[in-house]
Image: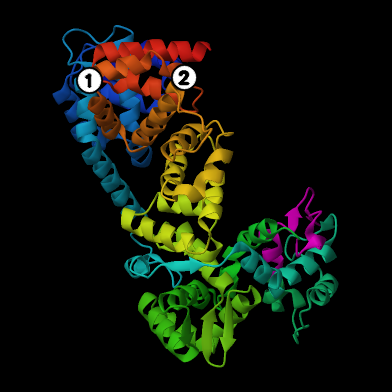
Amino acid sequence: MTDRIEVAATELRPLLEEFIMWARANAPESDPELVGPAALWHRLAFSQDLGTWKRADLRNLLLDRMPKVVEDPDAAADGMLPAVDAYLTFLSQTGRLNQGSDSLADLQAELDDVEDEFVDLMEELLDDTEGDDEEDESGDLGDFEPFADELAELDTIRLRPDTELAEAARQAPLVAKARDLAVWVGSGRKVGEDTLLTDAEVEEALAAAGLPRPETDGPIAEAVPQLWNIWNLAVDLEFLEPGEGGTVAVQDDTAEWPFDDDEDVLDAWMLGLHSVDYGDPELDDDDLTMALAGLTRGLLIRLLLAGGSRERAELAQELAEAAADLDELGADAWEAAGDPLAPAIDWLIGYGMVELDGDTVRLTPLGTEGVVHLIDDADIEVDARPAIESMSAHELLALSAELPEEEADAEFAAWMRLREPAKAAEELLDAAAEDDSDALIRVQAASVVGTLGEAAVPAWQAALKQPSLRPYAATHLSQLGVEGAPEPTQDDTHWLILDMWTISAGLGRSEFVSSLRDIGPEMVNELLEVIWKIPHAHVEELLDLISQVHPDKQVAKAARRALFKARSV
């Protein structure tokens, strides 16, 4: 078998090298490297002729053979079918797809038919691989995955405005301590291999960070875990940076904390967000310490699930039971720690994430923001949205594009109630003008502003100056009968069509092909003769896609001609 593989690989190599060169110009978004295994096993198992491809063989190759030989199921799930599509298109366009093959359109239709099943098979392989890797791993108290279903069922979480969150982050005591420690470190301080600092330096560092000196008979460096946590936080925040020759140095702008710019403040705070793990109890016995690993995250997720607050005693009992269930040393570790929640709550208060009101532990708005980010980092779904009153027009449009129509309408209605119609129209169209390549945002904005009637006239008139919005502005002003408004031109109409095609293409190949079929090949051909002239951000991409997927060969050929003209302008 090895000899057969080597012979087949040798035969394929020149063809694949030519395909790679072709793909750079004609299918830059595909990954030609993913084609090699598919082409090789097609040659070995289905056809000795490299140019003979049948629908049935293609299906068997992808659903029966590839799951047995693919090395990276994740990459294959994302890119194998587009790569094979590009390869088949290459064979067809270069005359290598011989007459004994099914047509390119039929082969592409087969790719569409098997897509869902192929992706499912790759995901099963991923699950199996992850299961093998994690078979002996039981996670820790901070694992969010067991709460995924509960998180998905939570009511919408409304996040506070950035200005409010940044102001809270500026008040976080731990960030100030990390700043002061980093400033004390200075530029190019030499650090040791066994202990970072000498005992004398540790005493200076404690004073700089505002920490008490512990009573200890041993080396002071071994009795100041809080200092080392703040040191690590300073590294996380990029206040400190390792240098050459065993040195560490403060970063130039560290002393300027708290920064003036809200975005800079939140960016820094987010860099240190994973410092929540430093709140976990540290015990003399490493095994006992590990039995309580993730405690601080476990506390946070339980607060969020409870609507933001819990009684301290309830949290302690629930987390103690979880620790005992998770690790055979959990109960012993809990007892040895005395009050395991104390360091966790202290750290979270210091980072601005929780507050203690008597016996009640409560998430702050900054804490809610942080937990949502941690959940997102864990790839778990939670419905979190900006507060309506602080949501920008662009945030509203981007969010609504992801929501079911009924929910999107409710978000728009709530947002519009806080603004005069003329102001709402202005904000929405300004947001739509931010990115000429974002057709979906543009269409959404135009659709909503179009419902505002006469109040939107000033905003539409201003939008006439924006090339990407002019077609919508001219159309709506004409419909409103505004005196002196320009009539929509043929180019305006073509721009609107390109926007619709862009959105359709974003929904997937089958949706795009369906939209083209709805127009009919004759109309598509007529459009291809002129639409290449429109300076639309996606015109070349769309023409290329039509040339690859349209079932009518004459239309595909016309699209290739139009693409050549567009690239020649």
Q: Residues within 10 Å of mark 2 (few under 14, many from 20)?
A: few
Q: Is residue 556 above or below residue 505?
A: above
Residue contact at pointers 1 and 2, CB within 8 angstroms: no
State the residue position of label 1: 105
Residue 6 drawn at (x, y percent): 32, 18
Name the residue nearer the viewer: 116 or 59. 116
Q: Secondary structure at mark 2?
A: helix
Q: Which mark is residue 317?
A: none
In the image, taking residue 532 as reference, residue 547 lies left or right, namely left
Q: Amino acid at mark 1?
A: Ala
Residue at point 54%, 89% (across, down): 338
Magenta extent: 230-259
Residue at point 44%, 51% (across, down): 452
State the residue position of label 2: 24
Q: Is residue 235 magenta?
A: yes
Residue 217 drawn at (x, y percent): 75, 85
Q: Quadrant of residue 207?
A: bottom right
* N-term mark: 1 or 2: 2
Q: Secondary structure at mark 1?
A: helix
Name the residue nearer the viewer: 391 or 87. 391
> Residue most toward the left?
56
Q: Is residue 336 above or below residue 249?
A: below
Colouring chosen for the image of the structure = rainbow
Q: Is residue 11 above or below residue 323?
A: above
What is the CA distance from the residue labelled 1 to the residue labelled 2?
22 Å
Residue at point 28%, 50% (across, down): 128
Q: Amino acid at mark 2?
A: Arg
